[in-house]
Amino acid sequence: MFTGHEFAEGGNFIANTLQQQKLKASFFFTGHFYNNYSNEKLINRLVKDRNFLGNHSDKHLLYCDWSKRDSLLVSKLEFLNDLFPLTETLGHLAEKAEQPGYKPAFIRYFLPPYEWYNDSIATWCKEAGIQLINYTPGTLSHADYTTSKDKNYRSSETIYNSITNYERSKPAGLNGFILLMHIGAGSGRTDKFYARLPELIKYLKQKGYQFQTVDQLLTID
């Protein structure tokens, strides 16, 4: 699963890798990303290649405090106004995909900004008929946005080893795992983890894993 808000420099490399490996992935973008004209060709290609595109909020707001998670930073109305603007955009993308059943799936799944939420956000999603999702914790794959100036910086080598070590050390490995990466990290990070994607896919294929998009993995009646 890939997310995108400000940056997309890895988009074509990722799309090429998926096409070469005959795989589909899930991409959750913000309204800022979808409405950025420079991303239009990439988005159309991802749709044409039958990848799954979903909702990562409109403005990428922080919904609750980092240190006091039960403390909301938005009202219910502000949250809903950040959740629903992408409905029409995703509906149009689903029509382009020309896949039966994709339209409701495109709209129904929501990955919150910063992958950070609390019970209020979960309740509001449920009331709106939206399935809130998140990545599976346990690896450092999501740290691929960090830069060398950050205290929480993780190199691509460290991230790759974290994934493979987790896979080898857990009884279930990465079975059912939702692995999150970013489609771009900007110029502040020169050590791009997406460049290791072909190597990672090869490793996981050799281990016998099958790759699924979020809507395939999460079956909702």
Image: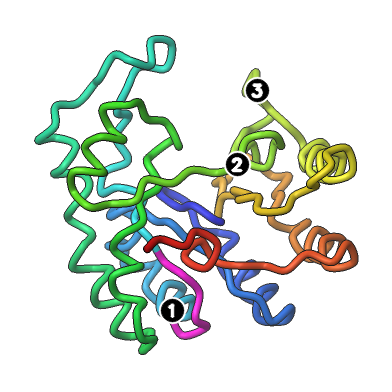
Q: Which of marks 3 and 1 is nearer the N terminus?
A: 1
Which amino acid lies under the numbered mark 1 shown in the image of this protein?
A: Val
Label 2 to label 1, Cα distance in Å?
A: 25 Å
Pick whichever, 211 or 88, lies toward us: 211
- Label 3: which residue? 152
Q: In this view, does 134 lie above or below 199?
A: above
Query: Circle 3 sits in a helix, a strand or a loop, which is it?
Result: loop
Which amino acid lies under the numbered mark 2 shown in the image of this protein?
A: Thr
Q: In the image, residue 221 lies at what x, y percent?
A: 37, 63
At horizontal 29% and vertical 28% (from top left) the residue drawn is 63
Pick whichever, 204 or 208, lies toward us: 208
Q: Which mark is residue 136?
A: 2
Q: In this view, does 22 lie to the left or right of 98?
A: right
Label 3 to label 1, Cα distance in Å?
A: 34 Å
Residue, far front: 221
Q: How crowded is mark 3: few (under 14 residues within 10 Å), some or many (20 or more)?
A: few
Pick whichever, 60 or 10, lies toward us: 60
Q: Is residue 97 above or below residue 141?
A: below
Pick whichever, 214 or 152, lies toward us: 214
Q: In this view, does 194 lie to the left or right of 117?
A: right
Query: Circle 1 sits in a helix, a strand or a loop, which is it?
Result: helix
Which amino acid lies under the numbered mark 3 shown in the image of this protein?
A: Asn
- Label 1: which residue? 47
Q: In the image, residue 130 lies at what x, y percent?
A: 27, 52
Please tell me in which quadrant of the rendered image residue 139 appears.
top right
Q: In the image, residue 201 lies at what x, y percent?
A: 78, 64
